């Protein structure tokens, strides 16, 4: 992310906070190493209303959440709120993830540091 991109994103964050927006989804820290700059800099802002959320997917099928790079990047963003998206449609579970409905949801409550009371707020 170039300097102008993350500075613009910080300006938009400030404007949304000034409008009273309660939650701002700041991006997916695991998608691009340069996005970490935004999450580092946004911690320096003194926000009046907003809580910053980082976005990610659940860990890969067959992987261990404790070893997943995207989950690690999500936690490293140090946001008070995280947004974790998981595929639940039977079509996606079978045809995209190539697993069974019983296997994929087993990851959702095991994402490290994302359960209630442990680290950032997570509504799984």
Image: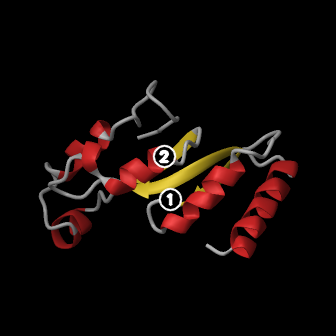
Q: Residues within 10 Å of mark 2 (few under 14, many from 20)?
A: some
Give the numbered dot on residue 12: none
* Residue drawn where x is 29% and y is 57% of the image: 88
For this rendering, which residue is in front, 60 or 6? 6
Q: Could you tell which of marks 2 and 1 lies nearer the N-terminus?
A: 1
Provide residue 41's location: percent of width, then percent of height: 70, 53
Q: Is residue 58 left or right of residue 16?
A: left
Question: Residue under circle 1?
Answer: 29
Secondary structure found at label 1: loop
What residue is rendered at 80% in x and 42% in y? 47
Cβ–Cβ under 8 Å for marks 2 and 1: yes
On screen, residue 62 versus residue 88, left or right, reads left
Does 9 sit left or right of 62 as displayed?
right
In the rendered view of the protein, which quadrant contains the N terminus? bottom right
The secondary structure type at the circle numbered 2 is helix
Q: Which of 41/91 is in front?
A: 41
**In which quadrant of the rendered view does residue 31 lie?**
bottom left
Q: CA distance from mark 2 to mark 1?
A: 8 Å
Residue 118, position in %: x, y? 44, 27
Q: Where residue 76 is drawn, which disc sits there?
A: 2
Image location (x, y in percent) of residue 99: 13, 61
Most extreme residue toward the top, as rendered? 117
Q: Crowding at label 1, few (<14), some or many (≥20) Cα neighbours within 10 Å?
A: many
Q: Residue at x 76, y 60 (%)?
A: 10
Q: The C terminus is located in which quarter? A: top left
Residue 95, percent across and down? 18, 72
| Left or right for 116, reference 9 | left
């Amino acid at each position: 992310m170039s300097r102008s991109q993350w500075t613009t994103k910080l300006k938009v964050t400030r404007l949304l906070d000034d409008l009273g927006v309660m939650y701002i989804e700041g991006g997916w820290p695991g998608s691009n190493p340069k996005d970490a700059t935004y999450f580092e800099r946004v911690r320096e802002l003194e926000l009046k209303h907003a809580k910053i959320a980082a976005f990610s997917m659940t860990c890969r099928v067959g992987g261990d959440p404790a070893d997943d790079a995207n989950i690690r990047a999500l936690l490293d963003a140090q946001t008070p709120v995280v947004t974790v998206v998981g595929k639940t449609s039977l079509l996606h579970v079978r045809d995209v993830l190539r697993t069974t409905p019983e296997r994929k949801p087993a990851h959702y409550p095991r994402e490290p540091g994302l359960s209630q009371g442990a680290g950032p707020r997570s509504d799984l």
